[in-house]
Image (tube, rainbow, N blue to C red):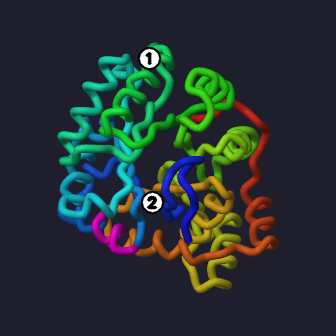
Amino acid sequence: MTRPFGSNGPQLAPIGQGSWNIELSERKAAVAALRRGLDLGLSHVDTAEMYGDGRAEEIVGEAIAGRRNEVFLVSKVLPHNASRAGTRAACERSLQRLGTDRLDCYLLHWRGSHPLAETFAAFEALLAEGKILSWGVSNFDVDDLDEALKVAGAGRIACNQVLYHLRERAIEHAVIPWCEQNGVAVTAYSPFGQGDFPEAASAQGRVLAEIAAGHGASPRQVALAFLTRGSAGFAIPKAAKASHVEDNAGALSLRLGEAEIARLDAAFPRGRPRGLPML
């Protein structure tokens, strides 16, 4: 199963591979896990200059060496680097650490003090030179997206990468509808939360386990299937072990029924609309 990444992007599997904190894992195992993900069709590989002060990019670069054409490679520029000249310099550093001549998508990690017009002008220049093939944003709420669209114009913003997991569904109120309406992919980072995935013995955990059992799947596969149920949805769980990558990839073939989606919706309520959280 694949879907378009934004209005003008390639077809990608909805499950990809993240790399936040991957540098804290044993390097050989992390590299092997990323390569196993490519074997299984998890071609969307996400990283950032911030992650481990560039060490995550180096690990990703090692993993994709010799397989670059199999990968949809994404990295991010830090807000304090996102001036017109600073964005270009940051991109060059990321390309060097990744051992590649191009990024498939380059994101502004979150909003900072530099005007969006400067950052987007740098993105467009890098695009014209072939150093990036598309660009997008991260951690943008609807007001930010409205401003970004006004600055960039329609069809330029490929994606918005945001925090999204079963216990953090704030983006469903307005961000996801906005992105679907404007042809912007929604990429969920930390799709299992941050060390707070529902315990099996909890009421929420039992719901996940019962739905998973009905499909011969794992609770985490159910979570990924739920989070990517929308037409614009992608998720990039980090996995530093091959067994975890294999479990994530199993979500690609899982289809939840309407009753199961309704049950998960009740077990993990969206709550009231509020400002977009950011990690």
Q: Quadrant of the N terminus?
A: bottom right
Report the amino acid beneath label 2.
Gly
**Image quadrant in which you'd find residue 196:** bottom right
Report the amino acid beneath label 1.
Glu
Q: Nearer the viewer, residue 115 or 48?
A: 115
Vertical placement of 126 versus 201: above or below?
A: above
Answer left or right for 71 relative to 13.
Answer: left
Answer left or right for 1 relative to 169.
Answer: left
What residue sits right under mark 2 in the picture? 16
* Mark 2 or mark 1: whose residue is earlier in sequence: 2
Instruction: Residue 72: give x, y in percent of width and height.
Output: 38, 55
Magenta span: chief secondary structure: helix
- Mark 2 or mark 1, whichever is nearer to me: 1
Residue positioned 39% across, 43% down in the render: 133
Instruction: Residue 45: give x, y in percent of width and height.
Output: 37, 55
- Which label sits on residue 87? none
Instruction: Residue 67: give x, y in percent of width and height.
Output: 24, 63
Q: Separation of disc 2 and disc 1 at Cα?
A: 30 Å
Instruction: Residue 197: give x, y in percent of width and height.
Output: 55, 59
Answer left or right for 118 relative to 91.
Answer: right
Residue positioned 53% across, 52% down in the render: 5
Vertical placement of 203 versus 10: above or below?
A: below
In the rendered structure, which segment of residues is drawn in magenta? 34-40
Q: Is residue 129 magenta?
A: no
What residue sits right under mark 1 in the picture? 118
